[in-house]
């Protein structure tokens, strides 16, 4: 089946569904968080099937072009797994239903007006002229637990050509949502939030010794017009310094990842032009962690085992892939001095998580490929049962031009104790750096 013919079928199927749903409240439709698949081929796309360069052509209609190129070059192969729905947190679903149709875009600024919680723009219409920026806001406010910790967080810098790990960093990470909370009381927001933040992210390097206690703090404001704030504590200088806007597109600690790449896109919505390129059905690295064969990996005291990385240079997460409905979203920087010409996101439609990202350099040439491997919370740690959504186990950012990659192995968990807001302050950076 050709890619063009498949997308035509998808378009016709989508139009038929829209016609059937006319006049109904779209958020009452379970397809918002569990989209139906229309081009499923059980003969080809069966669990256990392995996609290699030898049989790639029959699978290309369901693969991203950059992933196909890696398989064709014998740098990677994919195994298909069981299809499963990713759970959606009931409070997030309920908030989406309760506030459906209330959120508006302010025409001049692209800011949100009257957003209260849940998915800002359910039942996204790909023909809507504002669909691109609406999809961006759906991605920004996609569900994630309000308080998470990643105490086991390993960054590995890899030379693809020499198949060599050049450097290994261990980190601690934490994320706190101040507003639009769904998983942890108090709801819907923290009582004390004078800076009117939406969320904050904290990272600390534990090893190696030469950069130990280097820390990063990022504040994401509720108002998109407010400039994002970020600070670093450098152990070599023993002081906190503010990170300028330009530095957010520099390599973070010498890795292949920019600060702007964090969580898919860590920047202001208004700083990009957003274009929704359409909807599709594609294979994505989504799975159940406990269903993977990790028998060769060492378990920690909770029984958790890291995802294996394989393929050329050990740059690719060795997980199973399944067919999912996706959105293709393009982000073009408004700043002509930005080092990128665009980002192409392949977003899981059920969760609005950006699973695959193609990053293009200033000349428009494909530069990097980002891959997020995410598990269903139903097949993860017992302590994460209440997560109720996709849990990122591994990330790979592959520099296709330099033949280099950075892989992240992580064990993210719901915070066992309520996170202190003091952790997300510059005073805490100084305290921990002593």
Image: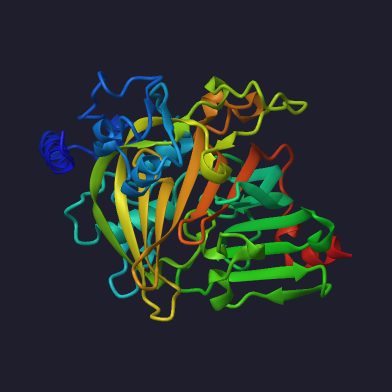
The spot of residue 231 in percent (x, y) is 68, 70
Q: Position of residue 45 (x, y in %)?
A: 30, 24
Q: Is residue 278 left or right of residue 200?
A: left
Position of the C terminus by quadrant: bottom right
Q: x%, y% of residue 227? A: 52, 74
Q: How is the image coloured?
A: rainbow
Residue at figure coordinates x 71%, y 69% from the top left: 232
Question: Could you say which is closer to the camera, residue 231 or residue 299?
Answer: 299
Residue 80 in which image quadrant:
top left
Please indicate whether residue 279 sits to the left or right of residue 355 in the image. Answer: left
Q: Can you see residue 236?
A: yes
Question: Can residue 221 be spotted in the picture?
Answer: no
Horizontal side, residue 222 vs residue 42: left or right: right
Considering the image in quadrants, where does the N terminus appear?
A: top left
Q: Which residue sits at x=52%, y=43%?
A: 312
Rendered residue at 36%/38% (across/down): 350
Residue drawn at x 49%, y 44% is 372
Provide residue 199's location: percent of width, then percent of height: 58, 57
Q: Decide which of 418, 311 is in the foreground and name it.
A: 311
Residue 46 to residue 255: above or below: above
Q: Which residue is situated farthest in the front direction here?
A: 162
- Tell me where residue 332 sits by quadrant: bottom left
Q: Quadrant of residue 97?
A: top left
């Amino acid at each position: 089946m050709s890619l063009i013919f498949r997308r035509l079928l998808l378009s016709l199927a989508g139009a038929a569904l829209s016609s059937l749903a006319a006049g109904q409240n779209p958020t009452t439709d379970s397809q918002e968080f569990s989209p139906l698949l229309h081009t499923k081929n059980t003969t080809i796309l069966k669990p256990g099937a392995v996609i290699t360069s030898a049989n790639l052509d029959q699978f290309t209609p369901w693969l991203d072009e950059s992933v196909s190129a890696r398989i064709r070059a014998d740098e990677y192969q994919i195994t298909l797994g069981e299809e499963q729905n990713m759970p959606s947190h009931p409070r997030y679903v309920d908030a989406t239903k309760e506030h459906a149709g209330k959120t508006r875009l302010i025409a001049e600024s692209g800011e949100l007006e009257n957003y209260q919680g849940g998915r800002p723009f359910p039942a996204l219409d790909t023909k809507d002229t504002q669909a691109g920026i609406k999809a961006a806001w759906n991605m920004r406010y996609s569900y994630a637990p309000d308080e998470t910790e990643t105490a086991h967080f390993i960054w590995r810098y890899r030379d693809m050509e020499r198949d060599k790990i050049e450097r290994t960093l261990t980190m601690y990470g934490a994320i706190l949502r101040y507003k639009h909370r769904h998983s942890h009381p108090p709801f819907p927001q923290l009582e004390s939030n004078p800076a009117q933040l939406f969320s904050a992210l904290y990272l600390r390097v534990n090893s190696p010794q030469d950069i130990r206690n280097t820390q990063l703090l990022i504040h994401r404001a509720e108002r998109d017009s407010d400039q994002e704030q970020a600070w670093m504590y450098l152990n070599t200088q023993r002081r906190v310094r503010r990170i300028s806007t330009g530095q957010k597109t520099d390599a973070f600690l010498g890795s292949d990842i920019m600060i702007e790449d964090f969580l898919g896109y860590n920047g202001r919505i208004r700083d990009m032009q957003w274009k929704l390129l359409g909807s599709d059905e594609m294979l994505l690295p989504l799975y159940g962690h406990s269903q993977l064969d990790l028998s060769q990996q060492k378990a920690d005291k909770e029984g958790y085992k890291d995802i294996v990385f394989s393929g050329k240079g050990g740059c690719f997460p060795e997980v199973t892939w399944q067919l999912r409905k996706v959105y293709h979203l393009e982000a073009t920087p408004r700043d002509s001095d930005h080092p990128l010409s665009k980002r192409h996101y392949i977003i899981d439609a059920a969760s609005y998580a950006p699973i695959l990202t193609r990053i293009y350099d200033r000349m428009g040439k494909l530069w990097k490929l980002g891959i997020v491997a995410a598990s269903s919370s139903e097949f993860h740690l017992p302590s994460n049962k209440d997560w109720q959504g996709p849990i990122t186990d591994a990330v790979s950012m592959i520099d296709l031009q330099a033949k280099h990659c950075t892989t992240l192995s992580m064990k993210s968990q719901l915070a066992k104790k309520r996170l202190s807001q003091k952790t997300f302050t510059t005073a805490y950076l100084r305290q921990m750096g002593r």
